Image: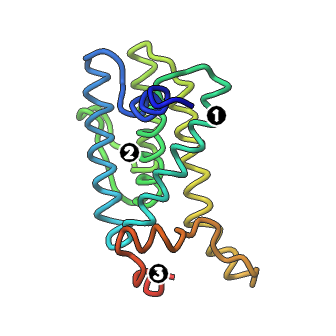
Amino acid sequence: MNKQHAVSKQNSYLFFGVFSVDFLFHMYFLVRYSRLLEEGDFRGRTANYVLMLLFGISCISLVAVYTHVHFLGSALTFMMLYVWGRRNEDVKMSFLGFFTFNAPYLPWVMLGFSVLFGNGVVMDLIGIAVGHTYYFLEFVYPVVAEIRGWRLKRILEPPTPLLWLLGNYEARAVHH
């Protein structure tokens, strides 16, 4: 892979199409829910947050090879919406003042919004699937593994070099 190809792959997560209402919504949701995740569930656990992003980007990139879609920002946004929604199940939300719903339905409401604007939903669905996979591996599996006494308690554990690099090495003992 040459340098230009690597840069274009990185930038493909930051492109949401031409400037439009849909573009504005995607940018807003990416920034807002990324921040809420970082300040909420991942407070003091920067390495875990980076690992979530790396997991999402890796999975989305693997699946994108088979979809021939080159712009992956929508999938990353939907992954974060899904994870945030599942971690905040009791939060009531309103979509443009039209109707209210609980946070776990946010990615599905946004999917409907994408359909209304005539956008493809393949990458949105991939983002939801990757978000669900991450949510299960990070928040559901460890609880089940603990209850059942399985030896492998956590699948998504940040490697020690990442913890040291991001200053979270001491946090490992606190949160796990």
Tell me the residue at 42%/52% (across/down). 85
Q: CA distance from mark 3 to mark 1?
A: 31 Å
Crowdedness near tag 2: few (<14), some (14–19) or many (≥20) residues, C-alpha within 10 Å: some
In front: label 2 or label 3: 3
| Disc number for residue 8 | none
Q: CA distance from mark 2 to mark 1?
A: 30 Å
Sequence-first disc among 2 and 3: 2
> Which part of the image, by quadrant, shows the N terminus?
top right
| Disc number for residue 172 | 3
Q: Amino acid at mark 3?
A: Arg
Q: Secondary structure at mark 3?
A: helix
Q: Secondary structure at mark 2?
A: strand
Sequence-first disc among 2 and 1: 1
* Residue for badge 2: 101
Name which quarter of the figure residue 65 lies in: top right
In front: label 2 or label 1: 1
Tell me the residue at 31%/47% (across/down). 93
Q: Secondary structure at mark 1?
A: helix
Sequence-first disc among 3 and 1: 1
Tell me the residue at 57%/44% (across/down). 58
The one of 2 and 156 positioned closer to us in this rendering = 2
Q: Is residue 150 left or right of residue 52?
A: right
| Disc number for residue 63 | 1
Q: Is residue 116 left or right of residue 140?
A: left
Crowdedness near tag 3: few (<14), some (14–19) or many (≥20) residues, C-alpha within 10 Å: some
Vertical comparison of 134 with 155: above or below = above
